[in-house]
Image (cartoon, grey):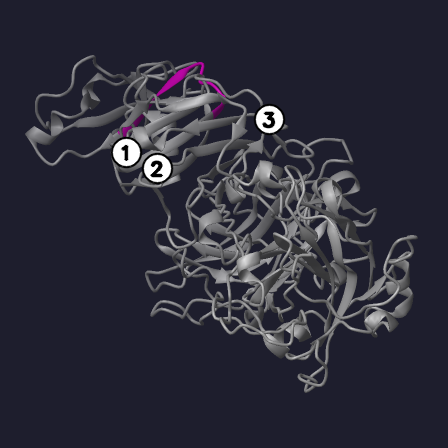
Amino acid sequence: MKKIHLFLASAVVLVAGCANDDYLGNAEDVQNTSGAIMFSSKSDKMTRADQVGATAAATLGGNFIVEGTKGTEAADAPSSKVVFDNYLVAYTENTAGTTESNTHNWEYVGQEAGTTLVPAATWTALHDGTTDAKSQTIKYWDYTEDQYDFIAYSTGTAKAVTGTPGTGEVKVTRIATGTALSTSAYSFTAPSVDELKQIYVTDITPVKRAQYGNVVTLKFKNLTSKIRLGIYETIPGYSVSNVQFYIDDATLIDADVSANKATLFSDDNTTSGIATSGTVAVYYPHIGTGNASEEDYNKASVTVTAGSTKTSTMGFGDLADFAGAESHEATGDYLGRSLPAATMAGDKTQAYYQNVIPTTAGVTLTLRVNYTLTSIDGSGETINVYGAKAVVPATYTKWQPNYAYTYIFKITDNTNGWTSKVLVDDDDDPSTPSVPANPSGLFPITFDAVVVAYEDATAEQTTVTTVATPSITTYQQGHTKETNEYSIANGNNVYVQVMNNSAVPSALVDDLDADNSLLFSVSDPDATEAEVMDALVNRTNDKDAASPVGRNGITLTTNSNIDNTVDEIVNGVNDDAIGITAGQAAAIDITALSAGTYAYVYVPTAPTADEAIYHCVTPANDTDAANYYEVATTSLTAATGTAAAGKVYFVANTNALGTITSYTFKQTKVGDDVTGLYEGTIPSDKATAKNTGSFYFDVFNQNNGKYAVKVIKVVA
């Protein structure tokens, strides 16, 4: 007969502040002498976000359910001999030492009567099998077995029930054993995120024979995701204030969301809105000795089934974390001016996070804002901008449990908003909203949407979305809120997706190819999206030039290190690949780039024609004049009909006698009516000197193409 040694074992109860943490090891090296297995709340190896002792107990509602087995690990399952059969473990302050099985205020013996949050009826329902234990007794370490395996969950401060859950309740199922753990271990159904955010689960925690008698770490992780939102601006010459969030295009001007209350919207909430209830099923996909080399060995995974209730609105609360006022500003209610100083929305005591139902499907989210620009020159000049819009693809809203995501939006001079408040109906279709009468003003706003994994720097996910029409989203694993730059040393590709936010509902484009999905190096390291856009549209070379040279002096050099044929985004959250189920994606090979400034350009409409644009200038001297084309006033003739290519046109200024005394240049385009104007011909060669009585012109080509731009800063 083998001798059975009975020694005390303790288990540390921790509430995790981060995702995917391994077994933390022993908190005590003191061998127990009573022989009973007990649960404690002390550890010497924790992260700064972990909770222990009474704090952890309060978060868990003073209860958890544990399944514990012993034996030898199989190829496809952990140990299989049941020791703790869905036992209820309860916390009571100042009870340590009152029984042999309780030294740290946690007790499991005799708890089948239930507690307030896990009542006896629930415990009975979890043990209604013919072979289940009918009472909870003391347990001892069995040294004839190779290892123990522990799995636990808690419904926190929500009541555990086995029927249809109501407010403040969560439906639970029993914890399975053996191979069933790999497909369906247990599940929870919650009527709202308020209940789901109370739920905590653990990975499988193995305890080898050498660890018997020491502390077992049960690390609980929350099942909800956390979301927060912030905004900053980089508009040259202006500060941004009075940010208003509007729900849909029909309420563009008269926003029905209050000023400063940050909000994201799902435009298609009937089919893919933001879930407000659901069922989360937990499973352990890689268990047993045959899977020990897998990265997620013994790790909890989940599948989420959204409930029938959805919402189209995700509110974050007031924008309250404003930057301090500068000398040109009247108050301090202005947006931050850098990514680390982004103005956050919501409750600062909660680090601005709110809980949401996890989703494996993702949902397209839209940000719509109106805002005010205030000049920084001290003049007090303001510009009101309406209708700025950004669309984040569903690819980057696949929220995983126990991860937190931060969406940062950047307002720049590349905005798709308008500076007109007058609305007109552009057609007779009542289903389409009115639009501003004068859709012109600033160049398109870009918004940076940064998604960061909470407390886990090795599993960050960051997306950067431009707000233009269309929107561009860029993503590189490891890109964080603290920097606007993409790192070559990071080694991960930068992935690009383009969202057509003119469609209803918005949709990812599926036509990325070498003709319309392009990467350029940018000659000016400080170029903005608006300046790159100007270089694409207004060129000194023609529309077919591979490397555009803008009238603003910026050269865009074609870069071939982009692949428009990828079918998945690797290095997603926790290194999982993100399959592309809609649209397409492009991959930029960052390791093939040098440090510098680049621009990703999507061309929704390729240019088909160039229009010569003539810009009147005043040269300083003969040398300066040689940079331009000269038209002498003595060569001007009366014009008739319409403007022609290669011609410039002038208004004649006369005195009281009708004599022409001077000419004023008038910008025209081919086809404009020029009756009554005077016409001159642009020569083929530039001037040789500055002459009195001549006009001088800078000539560039303006094409009719459409472009969407995202500037990408790359560092070593």
Looking at the image, residue 477 sits to the left or right of residue 469; the answer is left
Residue 263 position, x and y percent, is 63, 55
Q: Name the residue under label 1.
A: 552
SS state under label 1: loop
Residue nearest the viewer, comparing 655 with 38? 38
Q: What residue type is labelled 2?
A: Glu
Residue nearest the viewer, comparing 224 with 171? 171
Magenta stretch: give its range: 603-615
Q: Is residue 478 above or below residue 199?
A: above
Residue 264 position, x and y percent, is 63, 51
Q: Do the residues labelled 2 and 1 touch (CB within 8 Å)?
A: yes
Please tell me whether residue 608 belongs to the stretch shown in magenta. yes
Please tell me whether residue 478 belongs to the stretch shown in magenta. no
- In three-dimensional space, the C-alpha distance between marks 1 and 3, rounded to whole angstroms, equals 34 Å
Residue 390 position, x and y percent, is 56, 43
Residue 531 got which mark?
A: 2
Residue 307 got which mark?
A: none
Q: Please tell me whether mark 1 or mark 3 is closer to you in this view.
A: 3
Q: Are marks 1 and 3 in contact (CB under 8 Å)?
A: no
SS state under label 3: loop
Q: Dot 2 surroundings within 10 Å: few (below 14), some, or many (20 or more)?
A: many
Q: Is residue 633 above or below residue 475?
A: above
Q: What residue type is labelled 3?
A: Gly
SS state under label 2: helix
Residue 193 position, x and y percent, is 74, 58
Q: Name the residue under label 3.
A: 583
Rendering quarter of residue 583? top right
- Residue 564 shows in the view: yes
Q: What residue type is labelled 1?
A: Asn
Residue at screen point 11% across, 31% down: 624
Q: In this view, does 66 lie above or below 643?
A: below
